[in-house]
Amino acid sequence: MQLALFLIFGGLAAAGAINLLLQRHPINSALSLVVVMMSLAVLYWSLGAEFLAASQVIVYSGAIMVFFVFVIMLLNAGEEERTHGSRAAYIVGFPGAAAIFCLLSFVFLSERHALGSSNIGGYLNHVTSNIAEISTLLFTKLLLPFEVTSILILVAILGAVVLARKEQ
Amino acid sequence: MNSFAAAQVPIAAYLILAAALFSVGVAAFLIKRNLITIFMSIELMLNAVNLTFVAFAHMWHQVSGQIFVFFVMVVAAAEAAVGLAIIIAIFRTRQTLNVDQIDLMKS
């Protein structure tokens, strides 16, 4: 079950990411990013993070990506054209990204026995429910950071309104 | 079939998937010429890092990694709102989304 979920949705996430890279039109890239985020939600669920799986669907693929699609429609963004700058980026970009991937996979593979393997659903130490544990921690020990994020959201709303407003 | 159903996935496989998503995000960030697509590749990189957080939280049987992901999501939502407002402001003044033509600070 765990292996099947990982193979299907991990493959879907990787395919969506590569499709984001290959597509020329921003709306196609946005839709493949939605595919990546939905498959990541399933992977979170299989790793025992049900709350995060739900909020991944609601916040990321719901709110943020709809916002992206709205802006793409609003600005009437068309296909991107190839320019001089993109050739230099091709020369540096692909080997650089491949080097990052090789380095990270080398480290993870050399430590794979210490990392162990995962059971579906997962379990926490000395607790019964995942969401209960998250909310207990969030509203007791991490109350101040949690409240500060609400200020951050408020400032972000104000900033977005000021930036997107028409100049008088 | 029964052994396949009970098969476990190594944590390293999740981490390698996250590394692959992150490097695809880096490549898209460098190669793409459209401002909105570049911004989307940043979101892809954030998601890849979130996957490593959740995988490590699963590995240690602790919830702190999941709380970190929660805060990353909140900050990403705020960042998307401000970033897209900046993109709208740029488009209004320069009438383009191509990053090669947005070079006011270059000269």
Image (cartoon, helix red, strand yellow):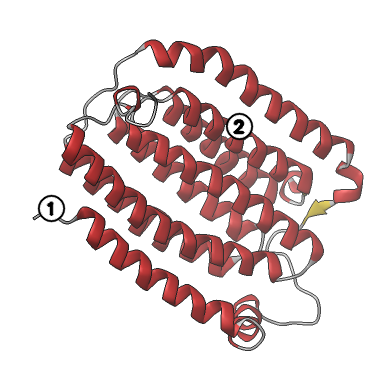
Residue at 66 percent of width and 81 percent of height: A133
Residue A73 lies left or right of residue A54; in this view the side is left
Indicate the amino acid at tag 1: Glu
Residue at the outermost left position? A168
Mark number, residue B69: none
Q: Nearer the viewer, mark 1 or mark 2?
A: 1
**Is any atom of residue A1 visible in this view?**
no
Q: What element carries label 1?
A: loop
Circle 1 marks a residue in which chain?
A: A
**Is any atom of residue A75 visible in this view?**
yes
Query: For residue B105, what is the image quadrant?
Result: top left
Residue at the outermost right position? A113
Please name the residue that numbered disc 1 is placed on. A167
Above-or-below relation of A53 to A145 = above
Please name the residue that numbered disc 2 is placed on. B23
Residue at 74 percent of width and 82 percent of height: A127
Indicate the amino acid at tag 2: Ser
Circle 2 marks a residue in which chain?
A: B
Q: Is mark 2 on a helix, strand or loop?
A: helix
